Image: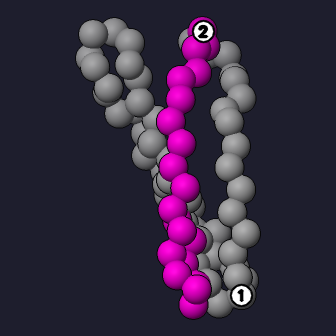
Amino acid sequence: MVITADSAGTSRISQRGAVTLAAGEPGALSSARAAGQAGGTCRIDLVLRDSQGGLGQAQLGEYTYDSSAGK
């Protein structure tokens, strides 16, 4: 999810999908872009889940990036 906030308000962009790869093989994920305003904030949250192996939606990792203007 990409969350941007500035004096005009808050925007949220979320995206879901699946990537099928063999173990140890890198693969491309889809992309999203957000253009922030000076003085605004932008945070990108990325959650990776494994839907295989009978564990349902096991969470593999969660990453948060602060990409606010001026950082």
> Could you tell me which residue is drawn at 69 percent across and 23 percent down?
26
Is residue 52 part of the magenta span, yes or no?
no
Between tags 2 and 1, which lies in front?
A: 1
Rendered location of residue 31, percent (x, y): 70, 43
Q: Which amino acid does label 2 sit on?
A: Ala
> Could you tell me which residue is drawn at 28 percent across and 20 percent down?
56
Circle 1 SS class? loop
- Nearest the viewer among 34 and 47 is 34
* Quadrant housing the C terminus: bottom right
> Could you tell me which residue is drawn at 35 percent across and 33 percent down?
59
Q: How many labels does the image show?
A: 2
Label number found at residue 22: 2
- Residue indicated by mark 1: 38
> Could you tell me which residue is drawn at 58 percent across and 86 percent down?
8
Highlighted magenta segment, given as a residue range: 3-22
- Nearest the viewer among 32 and 66 is 32
- Nearest the viewer among 71 and 57 is 57
